[in-house]
Amino acid sequence: MSTDQTETARRFMEAIPQAQALGLEILEMQGGVAVIRMPYAEALVGDPETGVIHGGAVSTLMDTCGGAATISHPGNAGGTATIGLRIDYLRGATPGQAITARAECHHVTRSVAFVRATAHDDDPDRPVATATGTFTVEAKP
């Protein structure tokens, strides 16, 4: 990814208040792949009895990661917006553990990017959720 794309991607993350509120941290972002970590926080718990993170927080993590993957793809000239996102929640994340999402922008047309993503806690062999999404693409000049 070029320096300009890296800077665009970082500005993208900084401009999203939800991403900041969730404490999202970019671990990797290049060539159409993004990895973003969301630390465990009591404020994100959806069920106080179990301590499991709310699905809405997981959804935001996966959506943001998909957008970051799209921005970092060499076929995208700029920003992005989510067109559609389908998330399948497979299990509750283990209380106390961070959730990490990995998204890959696997196909880009003139105006649409197609993304696949997974999210997991400390057990990478047991996903918390999977997602497929479509995102807008800015045409190259």
Image (tube, helix red, strand yellow):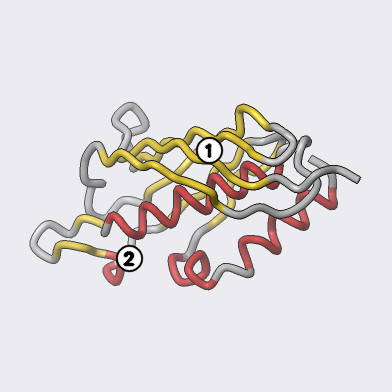
Query: What amino acid is labelled 2 in the image?
Result: Ala
Please provide percent x and percent y for residue 40: 34, 59
SS category of the residue bearing label 2: loop
Q: Residue furthest left?
A: 49
Between 76 and 119, which is closer to the camera in this rendering? 76
Residue identified by numbered label 2: 41
**57 displayed left or right of 138:** left
Between 118 and 95, which is closer to the camera in this rendering? 118
**85 displayed left or right of 74:** left
Say whether disc 1 or disc 2 marks the residue closer to the N-terminus.
2
Please provide percent x and percent y for residue 83: 53, 49
Question: Does 32 sit above or below residue 77?
Answer: above
The image quarter in which residue 32 lies: top right
Residue identified by numbered label 1: 103
Q: Would you call the spot at circle 2 few (<14 residues within 10 Å), some (14-19), or many (20 or more)?
A: some
Question: What residue lies at 44% left-to-right and 45% top-to-bottom?
Answer: 85
Question: What residue lies at 70% left-to-right and 41% top-to-bottom?
Answer: 111
Label 1 or label 2, whichever lies nearer to me, is 1
**Residues under numbered marks 1 and 2 in contact, where contact means CB atoms less than 8 Å apart:** no
Question: Does 63 sit above or below residue 57?
Answer: above
From mark 1 to mark 2, how far is it between C-alphas?
Answer: 22 Å
Question: What residue lies at 46% left-to-right and 43% top-to-bottom?
Answer: 101
Query: What amino acid is labelled 1 in the image?
Result: Ala
Between 105 and 52, which is closer to the camera in this rendering? 105
Q: Would you call the spot at circle 1 few (<14 residues within 10 Å), some (14-19), or many (20 or more)?
A: many
Please provide percent x and percent y for residue 27: 58, 47
Please provide percent x and percent y for residue 52: 21, 55
| Quadrant for the C terminus in the image | top right
| Quadrant for the N terminus in the image | top right
Question: Does 88 sit above or below residue 60?
Answer: above
